[in-house]
Image (cartoon, grey):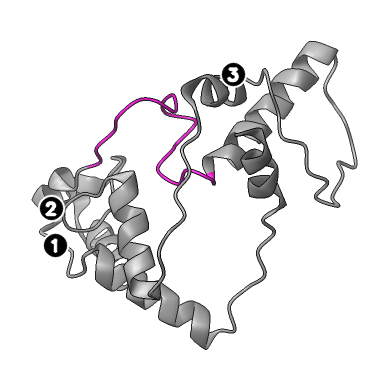
């Protein structure tokens, strides 16, 4: 959070950044498994990593298969005019929920199986900003914040349903 706040302040101070988009990440890069390993090491646990077969990922991503979990919320107004439009909207909602299972996914930018590396070179060049934290210190900071604020409840029913599929 400290790095992000400093980066945002640097963006506001640099006129060259007006109207531009920047990636805001930490030092270096992590694979998906590296992210899990770093988090697990901080927590002192052995992660139970499961792989989702590519055909299941494709079906989930394309909306051919959806995981339906009652969130307890409902739409007050349905303005969609056709079953096809409703299906497309549900697919988009599902894809964003699905992306929370694999945090590196940005379902509005690329498909699940694309390799993506986000760099901070433009941000550094245009503002002089440099991150002070690496992933391990960011995980520690986030964990401390969760602990200090009492954490929050997580609903793992979506993930439980996904595990049943594989």
**Quarter of the C terminus within the rendering:** top right
Residue 123 relative to residue 99: left or right: left
Q: Where is residue 116 in the image (x, y as percent from the top left)?
A: 29, 33
- Mark 2 vs 1: CB contact within 8 A: yes
Q: In this view, does 63 lie above or below 76?
A: above
Q: Name the residue under label 1.
A: 130
- Mark 1 vs 3: CB contact within 8 A: no
One can see residue 24 in this view = no
Using the numbered discs, state the Cα–Cα distance from disc 1 to disc 3 in whole angstroms.
38 Å
Residue 76 relative to residue 14: left or right: right
Q: Position of residue 73 (x, y in %)?
A: 84, 50
Q: Mark 3 points at which residue?
A: 62
Q: Mark 2 points at which residue?
A: 124
Is 70 in front, or is 34? 34
Q: Position of residue 107 (x, y in %)?
A: 49, 32
Q: What is the span of residues highlighted in magenta in the rendered image? A: 100-118
**Quarter of the N terminus within the rendering:** bottom left
Mark 3 or 2 closer to N-term?
3
Main SS type for the magenta part? loop
The residue carrying pointer 3 sits among few (fewer than 14), some (14 to 19) or many (20 or more) residues within 10 Å by Cα, namely some
């Amino acid at each position: 959070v400290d790095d992000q706040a400093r980066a945002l302040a640097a963006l506001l101070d640099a006129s060259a950044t007006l109207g531009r988009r920047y990636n805001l990440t930490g030092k270096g890069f992590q694979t998906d498994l590296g992210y899990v390993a770093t988090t697990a090491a901080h927590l002192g646990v052995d992660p139970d990593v499961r792989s989702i077969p590519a055909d299941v990922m494709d079906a989930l991503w394309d909306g051919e298969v959806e995981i339906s979990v009652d969130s307890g919320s409902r739409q007050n107004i349905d303005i969609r005019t056709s079953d096809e439009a409703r299906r497309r909207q549900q697919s988009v909602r599902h894809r964003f929920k699905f992306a929370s299972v694999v945090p590196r996914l940005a379902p509005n930018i690329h498909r699940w199986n694309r390799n993506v590396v986000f760099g901070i070179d433009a941000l550094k060049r245009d503002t002089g900003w440099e991150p002070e934290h690496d992933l391990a210190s960011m995980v520690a900071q986030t964990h401390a914040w969760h602990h200090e604020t009492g954490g929050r409840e997580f609903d793992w029913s979506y993930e439980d349903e996904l595990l049943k599929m594989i």
